[in-house]
Image (spheres, helix red, strand yellow):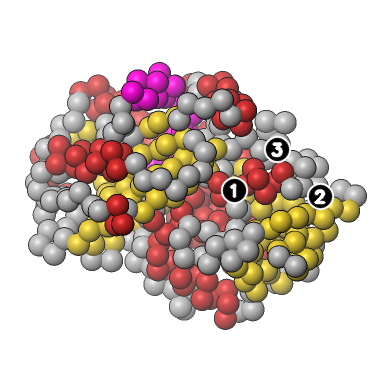
Amino acid sequence: MKAVVIGGGIIGLSSAYYLLQEGWNVTVIDKTDLTDSCSYGNLGMIVPSHFVPLAAPGIVAQGIRWMFDSKSPFYVKPSLSGQLINWGLKFIKSANTQHVQQSGPHLTAINLLSKQLYESLSHQPGFDFSFEKKGIMMYFKSEKVGEEEIHMAEKAKQMGLEVDILNAAEAQQVETDIALDVLGAIHYKCDAHLYPNKLNHQLIQYLTLNGVQFLTGQPVTKITKKQNKIASVHVGAEAVDGDVFVFAAGSWMPSLLQLAGLQLPLMPGKGYSFTQSHSDKTLQVPAILCEARVAITPMNQQIRFGGTMEIGPINDKINMNRVKGIVESVPAYLPGLPVEMPKPSEVWYGFRPCSPDGLPYIGYGAKYDNLLYAGGHAMMGLSLGPATGHLIADLATGKKPIIDISAFNPSRFD
């Protein structure tokens, strides 16, 4: 049986890995050379703590306020694009308390599964991607945000997650090397982190050595259908046939699906990161600066800083004001951690594929019997890679998925 995976980021590579374990003959197609997907520049966080979807109460009003600040962490670029308007209306409809309550258990389950699979993968020969279970520190500076974070931490405890609520002095005892200026912190001990650059390289190497075929450097230009199945996808002059097709193309999913006559509400959310060397001081535990929505992770003897969510059409422009917003936020929380304004050439950017309700699309769609969706993971692509790949392999093989995936139904907006 032959599986064709379109997309060579962490979701596509993980799908290929678990399909291979199930005995499938796998081909991975990607229009790039696989060196610069969202899976490379991210912060490497594995986040069972992130059980609240992007579409949450208050985010719409907050987003409107942030639209007038060029350094803000969340921004929707105004546009008359039908795709954006459609997405925005669905986002507004989803941003409610009931949606958050219903989504929490599903997001927690898939993140915990991914963490378990990452730990297992880290023990396999040929894999050493600096997987560490130190958790993540959520730092807050204001009483209002502190109350919100403590409330969320209590919910996390009720869901069985390992969490500590810390005052400023207790947080400083955890982060011993770097001076803090915070009101307190939530230490999500349930979380973990890894070095994504190593992970992707090692996955590609493993898949190549074990017979997976890679077709890179050219996009899919045509999709051939036969009755209610995908028959083949065309890459350059080559038609690639298969028994099952996994669409894992990240922010390019809508344009790919259009070739099959399908629509998918999904918008790219541009994020930025940069990595700097810190020889004298280093962060002990990855951190998220709550009010600023900035993430910081120690990796490969360096520190990576990242943030912003800019919803709009795919483009190759770097907004240095948004990068400046990341840089300027760090000293307010971590005055003991020096950070310099990077040059434009040192800034990485990528496009997170965002569904309107903040949940991924995982599973078969309604129109084609052999088309599997694996996309829309937003900021949790790296975190949810192995779990998504495992679920895709389960579905392709006809097994019952290892967890309930009803919330991730690709046809839920049809």
Q: On the rendered structure, is 11 left or right of 334? A: right
Q: Could you tell me the amino acid type at mark 2?
A: Asp
CB within 8 Å, label 1 to label 2: no
Residue 132 disc label? none
Q: What secondary structure characterizes most of the magenta part? A: loop
Q: Position of residue 264 (x, y in %)?
A: 66, 38
Q: Disc 1 to disc 2, how far (Cα)?
A: 21 Å
Residue at x-position 71% and y-position 64%: 235
Up the image or down, 154 lies above or below 378; here it is above
Residue 263 disc label? 3
Q: From where the camera sits, is residue 170 visible?
A: no
Disc nearer the start of the sequence (1/2): 1
Q: Furthest-bottom residue in view?
A: 209
**Looking at the image, which is closer to me, 48 or 90?**
90
Kindly identify which residue carries mark 1. Answer: 252
Q: Position of residue 57 (x, y in %)?
A: 44, 21
Q: Position of residue 229 (x, y in %)?
A: 84, 52
**Secondary structure under the numbered disc 3 in the rendered image:** loop
Q: Disc 1 to disc 3, how far (Cα)?
A: 12 Å
Q: Which residues are magenta?
A: 49-68
The crowd level at tag 1 (other Cα within 10 Å; few <14, some 14-19, many 20+) is some
Kindly identify which residue carries mark 2. Answer: 369
Residue at x-position 56% and y-position 25%: 80
Q: Quadrant of residue 359?
A: top right
